[in-house]
Amino acid sequence: MAKHKIPKKDKNIVKAGAVKNEVFKLYLVIVHHGTGSKVIHIAKESGIPGGTIILGKGTAQNPVLKFLALADYRKEIVMVLGKAGHGEVFLANVSKKLKFHKPNSGIAFSIPVNEIVGSKYGAGARPAANTSGGEKMEMYHSIFVIVDRGNAKEVVDAANESGAKGATVINARGSGIHETSKLFAFEIEPEKEIVMILVRRDITEKVTRAIKEKSSIDEAGKGIMFVQSVDEVYGIQE
């Protein structure tokens, strides 16, 4: 990566240089309520146009993933889509600026993206290749579970009992009585909850099996669960 002059307005921000055949990733940053705007600002300073902030909350107490496990604390989940070169710098900048090395400061990770449609970046992005930069390379999976509102607790309990150390719950809202958003053909309506869990790869199968058994998610209309690979991770306290 080429060296660049540090912007005068913030000497802690580093920008990415040009990278040939750039790929795209989805970057997720989980921070305390009210901090999401700072994350968006850092994204822009790192060469990424912006992102989306979603409200969520922590679910359980556990010393291993302390940040994801702060019970009843409001969270903001910042979702940023960006080129891998800019994104890796963005995660490093977020971790440094928001002090993710300290417990309960925040967690950030990236997920590969296979294709982009309708983005200012253009369509047909290639799958993101594994690259260096994260503190925990290729050691984690992210698990997303969508269930009826009120059922998130049993998903979190099942995950924790099988080795996960916490989760973030997002309340999903539809756009109107005659309109619903769909994810893999599963309707996300006002009464849904999305549970986001970060686990070590070696226990992913155990956790997903426990969730299926406890929540009966295999039954029609009960919900949906999917697992994504994680490239870089910042802020995990183990």
Image (cartoon, grey):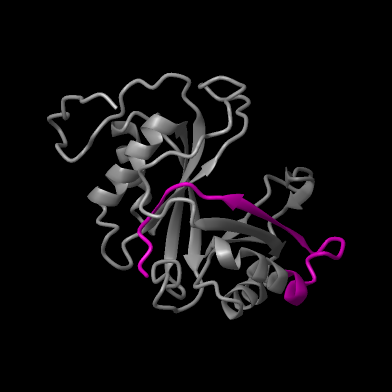
Task: Identify the residue at image location x=53%, y=44%.
Answer: 111
- Relative depth, front residue between 1 and 39: 1
Residue 171 relative to residue 30: left or right: right
Task: Identify the residue at image location x=75%, y=73%.
Answer: 215
Task: Identify the residue at image location x=44%, y=78%.
Answer: 62
The reply to whether residue 192 is visible in this rendering is no
> How many tags in the picture?
0
Quadrant of the rendered structure where residue 33 is? bottom left
Above or below, comparing residue 126 to residue 155 in the picture? above
Of all residues shown, which one is farthest toward the right? Answer: 220
Residue 110 relative to residue 148: left or right: left
The reply to whether residue 26 is visible in this rendering is yes
How far across and down, in percent of the image, does residue 115 sit?
A: 62, 30
Quadrant of the rendered structure where residue 211 is? bottom right
Residue 141 relative to residue 90: left or right: right
- Relative depth, front residue between 16 and 59: 16
Above or below, comparing residue 236 to residue 12 in the picture? below
Start-end of magenta stretch: 212-238
How far across and down, in percent of the image, does residue 92 sit?
A: 30, 44
Q: Quadrant of the C terminus?
A: bottom left
Q: Is residue 231 magenta?
A: yes
How far across and down, in percent of the image, does residue 82 sit?
A: 45, 32
Task: Identify the residue at image location x=33%, y=53%.
Answer: 35
How far across and down, in percent of the image, does residue 133 sit?
A: 35, 43
Above or below, comparing residue 64 to residue 188 in the picture? below
Q: Quadrant of the N terminus?
A: top left
Q: Is residue 137 magenta?
A: no
Quadrant of the rendered structure where residue 143 is? bottom right
- Relative depth, front residue between 129 and 164: 129
